[in-house]
Image (cartoon, grey):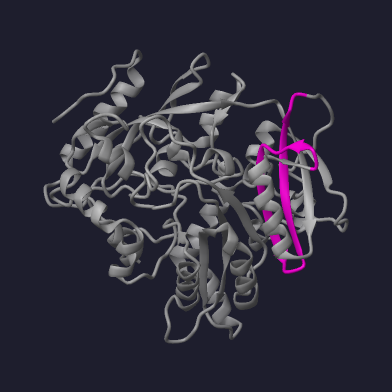
Amino acid sequence: MAVNRLEYQGSEFTDGVQRLVASYAAIPEGSTVRLAKKTSNLFRKRADVDVPGLDVSGLGKVISVDPATKTAQVAGMCTYERLVDATLRYGLAPTVVPQLKTITLGGAVTGMGIESTSFRNGLPHEAVQEIEVLTGAGELVVARPDNEYRDLYSGFPNSYGTLGYSVRLAITLEEVKPFVELRHVRFTDLRTLQDTMTAIIADREYQGEPVDYLDGVVFSGDESYLVLGRQTDERGPVNDYTHGEIYYRSIQHDDTETPKRDRLTIRDYLWRWDTDWFWCSRAFGAQNPKVRRFWPKKYLRSSFYWKLIGYDHRWNIGDRINARKGLPANERVVQDIEVPIDAAADFAEWFLAEVPIEPIWLCPLRLAEPSAGSADAQPWPLYPLERGRTYVNFGFWSAVPVTPGSPGYTNRRIEKKVDELGGHKSLYSESFYPEDEFYEMYGGAAYRELKSQYDPKARLLGLYEKTVKQK
């Protein structure tokens, strides 16, 4: 077994790595390797298997934070909640913090993460300096952009655990201030919103004030918002959306001339979407004032809602209730897609006209500026975004009535529209692409080469099998 990793002081992480490697060796030859992990932020159904999984119990913490170099060493299963708590004490944060507390750093890197810093910092994997991976072949290797495993370093994002699992990641951090000043800018026309967003990304300011964070919400064709955040260390009152009040409702107002203002602590800003899982907590009654008054605060978080969704997946509770009411079953439409920014209004208008789901989240992104020697136009082959081009991510998470005889009908229509507009979609949820179309969009040639090198015996599921065929 090849081992070329750093040695760390302290036994907890080292012991965790040893247990991980031992658990791999204990899985019978020919059996599929998987994580022994009960929780997930994926919306794909996971196949039930009887063999033991990889023991990742010792890989859930921050190993170290270096405020002088603005870097952190992080175990692969560490959640962003734990990572942020460790870095904020030094006035630092990951360059991109996905919206939900229980997303792991390793999960965001092997999948795709995005947030309101993505218009200037790109995606989470772009802050990775090196990544230690347990490959499908059972080897521990350290991949960097300048060593013999550079192909794994660039091919790991969007591989979803089909090449290997992250054990440790060294990441770059950025300085943050204690508070975020927000402006909620209302639009009655999606094309004006698109043009304004383009200008903000180019100028990094709006009406003379800097913009450090940028995302938005589309409630309807004539009510949409850009939310502009500015870091500040100015003391003053802040709002709290972690219990009684609901953040996404606070965005709404009637004045199209004067933005509505708000202030949050940096921690509450980073987790502003987690309390109500964006707006999905309404499905559980958590936004009803009479219910919310008695809802324990500790259960106002995405991880608890996810448990409720898990029960529904297991026992088809929603479909059974619909059947008793004489209603059709639901097709889940839980997706994040992105299209080039000049097609953002086209997609939003089409979606609002064709899919009965609202609100919609939007978030612009650009690949980060390259470091010396890494100026590839498409540096991440399994999710080929163009460097220097701006995209807009749209997130929508709900369900629509099924179309009889057409499994995944609405999802497939969305996939085709996104492809037509030159975009992609994230693979954390259900996908319905034919295999040849899938690999044309997600770096098939590069993936097959990586798979043959790092998982030659196919101990891990393939990318198409895991993200499309596994239902």
Whether residue 67 is situated above or below residue 335 in the rendered picture: above
**Nearest the camera: 463 or 193?**
193
Residue 106 in the magenta stretch? The answer is no
Q: Quadrant of residue 134?
A: top left
Question: Picture coordinates of residue 53 (x, y %)?
Answer: 27, 45
Tell me where residue 220 appears, x and y as whole percent.
72, 67
Question: Which contiguous range is marked in magenta?
Answer: 207-233
Q: Is residue 211 above or below residue 305?
A: above
Residue 223, by quadrant, is: bottom right
Tell me what residue is drawn at x 37 percent, y 42 percent: 376
Q: Position of residue 299 (x, y in %)?
A: 63, 46
- The residue located at (22%, 37%) in the rendering is 23
**Residue situated in front as seen by the camera: 34 or 76:** 76
Image: 318 above or below 136: below
Q: Taking 249 as reference, is 64 left or right?
A: left
Name the quarter where the N terminus is drawn.
top left
How would you classify the magenta stretch by its main secondary structure?
Answer: strand
